Image (cartoon, grey):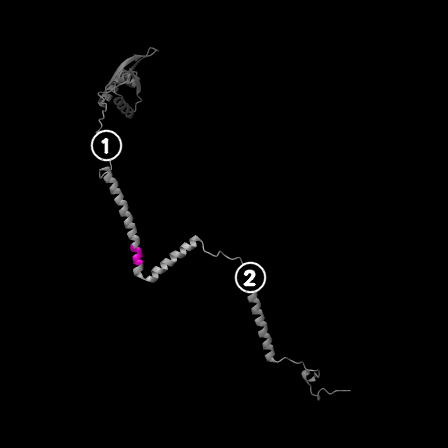
Amino acid sequence: MIHDFATTPRVPAMVRDTGPARRRPPAGRRWGWLILALLLGVSTVWKVSGLLLAAEPEADAGPGDEARREYLQAAASDEVLLAGPEAAQSATTEAGDNSTSADAQQLARLEAAMQQTGSSTPAYGFYDSLQTSPWQVPVQRGVYYTEEDRKRAARRYLLQAASLRHPGEARDLVNRLRKKGLAASFAAAGDRYGSTWYRVNVGPFQNVSKMNKAEDTLVAMGMMPLKRRL
């Protein structure tokens, strides 16, 4: 059989479905089931939370000493604040009066102790006795020297400024040293080879400080003096 699709109208699929139609529940019943499920969930959560709270260990029934002290202090401060500025001022005045009375009592005890001693100032008997006691200090008379000091004081020193071959050169050097304020002189001396040398000497010195000053003068003139003990 041949169908003419061009002339035959097309029918939608939903119209062509000739099976039995599904029955849908009314809208009011759906809302009722939803509310019932919500109530069941809330009750379940409430019961579970109650069981968890019951399973936790109970804390101490009474607060400790520190907590009780803080609580009492807070309550007292709250009472003062609620009473007004007059109560706060009276509390401060009472604390100041207590400290003032304690200071007054301590001062009274000190005054009583000083009156018992019979003097307003503390006595230092040991130091007072030291001031009144005679002290004899030995007085050194003269200067004391040891044997070594006496020997050192008796020593005499001589500075040899130069040793020259000709007496004229020695005489010229002596004149130069005398112009510098030094007590200079020269003397002839022979060596083991039979030669004659003329030694220019400065001194003698018995004071070491003067000898050191003369030595500095010779060094400044470009000489290297030799120190000789007589």
Residue at left offset 34%, top offset 62%: 82
Q: Is residue 189 left or right of residue 56?
A: left
- Magenta span: 88-93
Callout 2: helix, strand or loop? Answer: helix
Picture quadrant where residue 157 is located: top left
Q: Is residue 89 magenta?
A: yes
Depth order, front residue of 170/14: 14
Residue 142 at x, y = what percent? 22, 20
Q: CA distance from mark 2 to mark 1?
A: 86 Å
Residue 46 visible in this rendered orientation of the protein: yes
Depth order, front residue of 133/53: 53
Instruction: For label 2, count other residues whose C-alpha is less than 10 Å away and answer few (under 14), some (14-19) or many (20+).
Output: few
Disc on res. 52:
2
Residue 117 at x, y = what percent? 24, 37
Residue at left offset 29%, top offset 57%: 90
Callout 1: helix, strand or loop? Answer: helix
Considering every residue shown, the one lying at the far right of the view is 1
Depth order, front residue of 70/147: 70
Residue 79 in the image: above or below residue 141: below
Residue at left offset 27%, top offset 46%: 105
Residue 46 at x, y = what percent? 55, 66
Picture quadrant where residue 75 is located: bottom left
Instruction: For label 1, count other residues whose C-alpha is less than 10 Å away and answer few (under 14), some (14-19) or many (20+).
Output: few
Residue 77 in the image: above or below residue 156: below
Assign the N terminus to one quadrant of the image: bottom right
**Amino acid type, callout 2:** Leu
- Main SS of the magenta part reads helix
Residue 169 visible in this rendered orientation of the protein: no
Disc on res. 128:
1
Assign the C terminus to one quadrant of the image: top left
**Amino acid type, callout 1:** Asp
> Tag 1 or tag 2, which sits nearer the N-term?
2
